[in-house]
Image: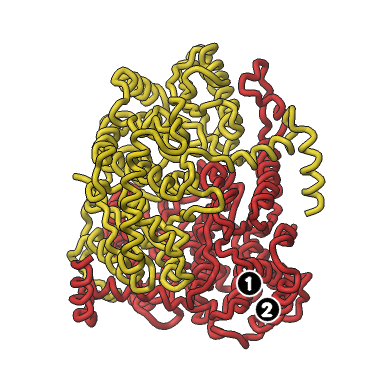
Chain colours: A red, B yellow
């Protein structure tokens, strides 16, 4: 039950010789990545997380997760960027639409995300929503001083402390740097349970650390299965793996060949709305890894068939500078047949007895051909079903592909120098000590705009 | 209390003479639009909807909305594309995060959207979720035969009929063509209440018809205020309006000047996650209106500050082919101050006593300058607050801008020829009568991919 990659839909759009050259380079890049000889090699800890995660750590993670499930009505997961999107993506991909968990036998608290923006109304309304509920929180931050999560944590911590008294410290769990930083110090002082994010794992590659795994354990998901899926893709893409066996190298080569052929936008499409946040996570993974030095593919996401009635027109006939990577799911959890209707006023009887997921599949295949005919190259990622094992594969597949792809683009895929620019300005405008002089200059510029 | 546009952040990126020329053309395009002398002029009914909506129709709309609010626990709004996104966008922009309505005095059923995709699990789980609840539905479809909403409607209608007996017809409301089509016939035969979508209003411009207004009335929103806001922008952009007074012409001219200067992607950014679906609606409005004849700006959306920790890196330092249009909200509903903390372990005490929305504003202003410095032109749309009146202004502002912008691009902004391509293939693959020969050909092509 492996995810599958199909790049046949790119063939008529890329030069064969260029693709061959990139294929060879992708094999070399994969080796450089595995052996730590490429750019940013001090941030490669994520490569072996699936196969090396400590059993004791995993046991503790499941225990703490279980405790929060049992003693909480609401668990707030506080984090931003990589400390938010990975957990959110997997949680949404594997949770029911209209209830909290598919597992009716175990208690499942409501999982609320916070600290991922600065909307004051959101935090106010969240505090009101807490009313009468047993609240716990997981705060994920390497430093503990990133503004958005730090603000949310200050507010949630205060709430928990004022409502739970001595029990508060059993309701707050910190996922942070192993030794340094504000959150590590605070946790030691206050006696919170803690988990470490390894030094050599960057935020957007941290899903298989407790940053991603702890909120998922609280949501009742099987983190061992997630890791097992990831480990199986880790095994596929060893340093010596041939191009033909390494779907990560194939995806990286294909998308770079398209980029060099003038396809500047990649649209990650799904036909299952549960995968919406997988695209959000993927946009960070690729956008933040590759969008630098005035280059990189612009990552966008669409939810089909919904967006066939929105961006579909652009994709079919707009500027011919985009390509699609389509996630499709072989098997849904449930089967629902379209019923027959005597009167057939809606003319749907030709579908009577067909399952809705079959109709969805034909929509996907029809769209694939329509878009290729319209000049949109197509890459397919086929997922056997939406479960922990397959999603673990998918996440590691994209992570590994992203590392290889960044090397093909000749950037350091593991830094994010541009993220500091807005923070510096924000600190200056907010009068943070040390930034005062800069603040006055910025205010003058704003007044002139 | 008007929305405001500021295009000062584009000045250093566009040639002054080109902008002047486009400004003059925008005034002419605005006139052509108002007078019906441009492309697609048989689809201009939306222009005057805010000022001309029939009072009797509005009364009936509020009555039916009130009935559904009173007799339902769940109301399913069925539709796709323009029959979904407008209602969804306004509903999310004006609803609380953790409860159904800000109005504690009136009953508010749960509003569920369906028929906007083909995920079978979603429909299965929705049916289970109905259990024990009083269910009603609003089905929005001009023809009644669009696959996604027709499938969902067949299933929901069956559920309601089998659970409500003779009461079913009071629980189903159809918004459809005034005279023709499958849904109109069915409604007449079964005695459903109906509302009409005028012939000369296309889906993505239909928010101010019952297609958008009825679900919003059910959600407890004040549709009169929404229309009043829209009507006030309608008045601003009369045929004779000067460029300086017409924010719609200004936005259209600025974005086309940027497009001609090589900025091929427009990112609509918000700092309030409630506006997420306004960007989804906007992506359809502009993408479907302009993405044709191998041209058009590619529309993308981001939720800040969240996505400053995701796409932020790309925006700051990736390919310099994008610009931003930023929605900001002057005033939040609630004020929440960041509390002081004696220990200040998170180093946030410099923010103590500041409101979170002030911090959000400084993040926005800091980002504005950082992105301009990074080579990203900036357009600002400032919204006094998130209420019906201001959102009505915003929606009409974007609609009118879009019509003008399409004329500047020299396309017909009111058709969507590319949306048919996937549908034809899907019908063929599904064996719809009349498409059999085509189906066999497509299956052969798929087998070869």
Q: Which residue is mark 1?
A: A400
Q: Assign the C terminus of chain A to one quadrant of the image.
A: bottom left
Chain hosting mark 1 = A
How crowded is the residue under tag 2: few (<14 C-alpha within 10 Å), some, or many (20+)?
A: many
State the residue in front, A219 or A381. A381
Q: Residue at x 54, y 83 (%)?
A: A40
Tell me: residue B303, above or below residue B243: below
How far apart are the two marked residues, 2 and 1, measured between alpha carbons? 8 Å
User: In x, y percent, where is residue B409?
Assistant: 45, 50
Q: Residue at x 43, y 33 (%)?
A: B41
Q: Secondary structure at mark 2?
A: helix
Q: Which residue is mark 2?
A: A30
Q: Quadrant of residue B181?
A: top right
Pointers 2 and 1 in contact (C-beta within 8 Å) = yes
For this orientation, the residue located farthest to the bottom is A37
User: In x, y percent, where is residue A70?
Assistant: 47, 54
Q: Is residue B415 left or right of residue B109?
A: right
């Amino acid at each position: 039950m492996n995810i599958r990659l199909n790049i046949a839909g790119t063939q008529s759009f890329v030069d064969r010789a260029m693709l061959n050259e990139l294929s060879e380079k992708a094999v070399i890049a994969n080796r450089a990545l595995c052996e730590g000889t490429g750019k940013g090699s001090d941030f490669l800890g994520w490569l072996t997380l699936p196969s090396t995660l400590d059993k004791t750590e995993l046991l503790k993670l499941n225990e703490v997760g279980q405790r929060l499930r049992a003693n909480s009505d609401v668990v707030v997961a506080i984090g931003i960027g990589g400390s938010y999107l990975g957990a959110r993506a997997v949680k949404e991909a594997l949770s029911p639409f209209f209830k909290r968990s598919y597992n009716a036998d175990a208690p499942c608290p409501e999982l609320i995300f916070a600290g991922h923006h600065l909307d004051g109304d959101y935090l106010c309304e969240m505090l009101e929503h807490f009313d009468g509920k047993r609240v716990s929180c997981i705060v994920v931050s390497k430093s503990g001083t990133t503004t958005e999560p730090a603000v949310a944590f200050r507010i949630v911590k205060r709430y928990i402390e004022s409502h739970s008294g001595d029990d508060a410290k059993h309701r707050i769990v910190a996922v942070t740097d192993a030794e340094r930083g504000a959150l590590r110090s605070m946790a030691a002082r206050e006696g919170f349970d803690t988990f470490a994010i390894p030094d050599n794992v960057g935020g957007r590659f941290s899903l298989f650390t407790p940053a991603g795994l702890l909120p998922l354990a609280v949501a009742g998901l099987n983190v061992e299965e997630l890791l097992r899926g990831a480990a199986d893709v880790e095994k596929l893409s060893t340093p010596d793996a041939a191009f033909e066996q390494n779907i990560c190298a194939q995806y990286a080569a294909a998308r770079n060949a398209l980029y060099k052929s003038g396809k500047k936008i990649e649209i990650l499409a799904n036909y299952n709305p549960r995968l919406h946040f997988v695209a959000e996570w993927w946009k960070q993974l690729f956008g933040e890894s590759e969008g630098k030095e005035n280059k990189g593919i612009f990552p966008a996401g669409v939810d089909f068939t919904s967006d066939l009635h929105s961006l579909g027109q652009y994709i079919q006939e707009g500027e011919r500078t985009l390509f699609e990577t389509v996630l499709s799911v072989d098997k849904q959890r449930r089967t629902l047949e379209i019923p027959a209707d005597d009167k057939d006023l809606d003319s749907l009887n030709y579908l009577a007895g067909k399952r809705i997921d079959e109709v969805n599949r034909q929509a996907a295949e029809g769209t694939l051909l329509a878009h290729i005919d319209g000049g949109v190259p197509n890459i397919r990622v086929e997922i056997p079903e939406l479960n922990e094992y397959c999603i673990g594969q998918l996440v590691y597949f994209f992570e590994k592909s992203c590392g290889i792809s960044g090397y093909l683009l000749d950037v350091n895929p593991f830094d994010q120098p541009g993220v500091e620019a807005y923070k510096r300005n924000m600190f200056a405008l907010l009068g943070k000590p040390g930034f005062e002089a800069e603040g006055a200059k910025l205010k003058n510029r704003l007044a002139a705009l």
